[in-house]
Amino acid sequence: MEYNILDGKATAAAIRAEIKQEVEDILKNGGRRPSLTAILVGDNPASCTYVANKEKACADAGFTSEVKRFSSEISEEELLDEVRKINADDSVDGLIVQLPLPKHIDEKKVIETISPSKDVDGFHPISAGKMMVGEDTFLPATPMGITTLLKRYGVKTSGKHCVVLGRSNIVGRPISNMLSQKGEPGDCTVTICHSRTKDIETFTRSADIIIAAIGIPHFVKADMVKEGAVIVDVGINSIPDATRKSGYRLVGDVDFENVAPKCSYITPVPGGVGPMTIASLMINTLKAYKKRF
Ligand code: NAD
């Protein structure tokens, strides 16, 4: 089957250009730049890369962005104080705390301390609760990136059976909720599969749309997918690859090479959901800014 790539890289670039234009218009009208602050604790290489990518995207779009770096020795109370300080800082519109945090810090406490008005990651229980009941809020960046990508490609979701693999708070659970809500993208019949699901293939084989967010390289194989399915691969997994200078390469949760020919649409890894996540964070930061002015 001739499949279509859901090109997250190109779509995110288009969104970022639109945001940049909007920031220029704001500045022309005498407004100030939207601003995002990221808290980074410790030196986890993946976290450092994610934060650097977010910082670069913000700078490119004309946002003010700051990364507050702290040693992994910082105490929970000190970190909570830093969050409170940024909450009170009128020049900051959005605040994100890069996860994971060191073991001695309760992530839940930190997230719950972020002001919901600055919660551009959409992880605060107030944001999650509003999403759940379909109220306007900051949607979590990765699920929002997925629905934006489906919408921009005109992928119809109404009445479709969507199987979500994974039930994390940042991807699986929120995307399941969002796609079950009224509207387009939405109106799906959603099945959530997770580590305790038995005979997962029986669900995936009947899926019109599969969202894979489990973190196991090449988990979704061709015989698990029906002809014409839409596949969104959220996974980012590093596997050894001696042909690369780095000694590794990134792959998704889907066996792209063998699955793609059966699909109508599929996201690549890299260049699929990843760039859309950053674009969504920027949409949310602009939204936080607009809510205040
Ligand atoms: P997580 O580890 O929090 O959750 C994994 C989920 O997969 C769990 O709910 C678990 O029940 C399920 N699972 C584990 N083994 C399973 C199995 N054998 N069968 C069925 N389900 C199984 O992960 P997460 O934070 O949701 O991330 C998932 C993947 O997505 C990771 O590879 C992560 O790196 C990637 N990710 C990508 C982006 C992006 O921007 N592209 C954003 C977030 C996460």
Image: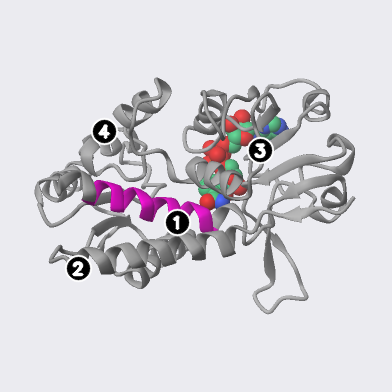
Tell me if 290 is positioned left or right of 262 in this view. left
Q: Nearer the viewer, mark 4 or mark 3?
A: 3
Ligand 1 located in image quadrant: top right
Sequence-wise, the earlier of marks 1 and 3 is: 3
Tag 4 secondary structure: helix
Find the distance from the CA under tag 4 to the CA under tag 2.
32 Å
Whether residue 181 is visible, yes or no, is yes
- Three-letter amino acid code at the position of disc 3: Ile
Measured Cα–Cα span from mark 4 to mark 3: 28 Å
**Residue ID for mark 1:** 279
Magenta: main secondary structure? helix
Report the residue marked by disc 4: 112
Q: CA distance from mark 1 to mark 3?
A: 19 Å
**Residue at mark 2 to residue at mark 3: CA–CA distance:** 39 Å
Q: Secondary structure at mark 1?
A: helix
Label 4 CA crowd tier, 10 Å (few <14, some 14–19, many 20+): some
The residue that label 2 is drawn on is: 27
Please tell me whether residue 283 belongs to the stretch shown in magenta: yes
Mark 2 is on which residue type? Leu
Which numbered disc, 2 or 3, marks the residue that appears first in the sequence?
2
* Residue named by callout 3: 211
Q: Nearer the viewer, mark 4 or mark 2?
A: 2
What span is in magenta? 275-289
Q: Could you tell me which secondary element the residue under label 3 belongs to?
A: strand
Mark carried by residue 116:
none
Asked if 131 appears above or below 257 in the picture, the reply is above
Amino acid type, label 4: Glu
Quick check: 74 left or right of 197?
left
Circle 1 packing at 10 Å, graded few (<14), some (14-19), many (20+), is many
Which numbered disc, 1 or 2, marks the residue closer to the eye?
2
Nearer the N terminus, badge 4 or badge 3?
4
The amino acid at mark 1 is: Ala
